[in-house]
Image: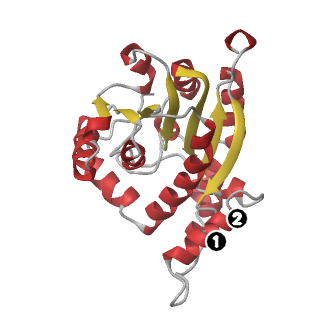
Amino acid sequence: MQDRNFDDLAKKFSKNIYGTTKGRIRQAILWDELNALLPTLPEGPLQILDAGGGIGQISSGLAAQGHQVLLCDLSAEMLRLAQEHAQAEGVSQNMQFKQISAQQVGEHLDKPVDLVLFHAVLEWVAEPEQVLKALYNVLSPGGVLSLMFYNRHGLTLRNLTLGNFGYLRADMAKRKKSTLSPDYPRDPVEVEQWLNACGFVTEARAGIRVFCDYMSEPPQRGEGTEAIIEMERRYCRQEPFLSLGRYIHVTARKPVTQDEL
């Protein structure tokens, strides 16, 4: 098993993941979560790592706020698109780009970072515990991991509603390699165990797209994307809806030890 490199699917990924209603909903909830955690971090420009950052939509938004961002990705094509996006947004001066894996990033940092973004990457890596430990190690004490991962429970529910029983009997084994369907959908309980084992303390959780993927048809006229986002915001932090999101976002902090106080 190996981590996924998106050189072959970069443009398709950009179009299908970000350029859709589902992408807008995902971005809206992610920004809500980030806007809640940013005030808990030190004042002044933050040092931010966007690990497996793709085209860098979120990190370029943070760079626009004056923060310093290192975006790394295995894919040279993704990095090219990220650089183009940063230039278009006028934030290149606050961003660096490196073609490295999340596991390697500690070798390329002069000092720990305040915030790590790890969005929609955990479901593509073969050794998730190793990656999470590497990200823990590059965080400063009191720093935060913003983790979003593809939820196995959400995938199960979607296939139940579609009647894909044969696929479920096969334990949802991926049929084709070159698709945008993640290689390793994650069980939230397992992810929580991995975070705890690293030393993280989970502070908040939210579901992303807790209902919209299961809608049989679009809402009636006058109830478009903004209405869907409104309802997603209303229910995304409530159980049982949270645990059925297609993605789960976790805010996890690296504790400050007594010696560091």
Q: Amino acid at mark 2?
A: Tyr
Image quarter (top left, top right, bottom left or bottom right) of the N terminus: top left
Furthest toward the bottom, the residue is 221
Task: Evaluate whether residue 102 shows in this view.
Answer: yes
**Callout count:** 2
Q: Is residue 224 above or below residue 242?
A: below
Left or right of residue 248: residue 59: left
Q: Where residue 199 sits in the image (x, y, percent)?
A: 69, 22
Image quarter (top left, top right, bottom left or bottom right) of the C terminus: top right
Cα separation, mark 2 vs mark 1, equals 6 Å
Task: Evaluate whether residue 186 shows in this view.
Answer: no
Q: Where residue 72 sits in the image (x, y, percent)?
A: 35, 31
Question: Which residue corresponds to mark 2?
Answer: 235
User: Dot 2: what SS?
Assistant: helix
Q: Residue at x 52, y 88 (%)?
A: 222
Mark 2 and 1 residues: CB-CB less than 8 Å, in contact? yes
Quarter where residue 204 is shown: top right
Please tell me which residue lies in front, 195 or 129: 195
Please tell me which residue lies in front, 120 or 60: 60
Please tell me which residue lies in front, 243 or 258: 258
Left or right of residue 133: residue 80: left
Furthest toward the front, the residue is 44
Question: Which residue corresponds to mark 1?
Answer: 231
Checking the image for residue 147, the label placed there is: none
Q: Amino acid at mark 1?
A: Met
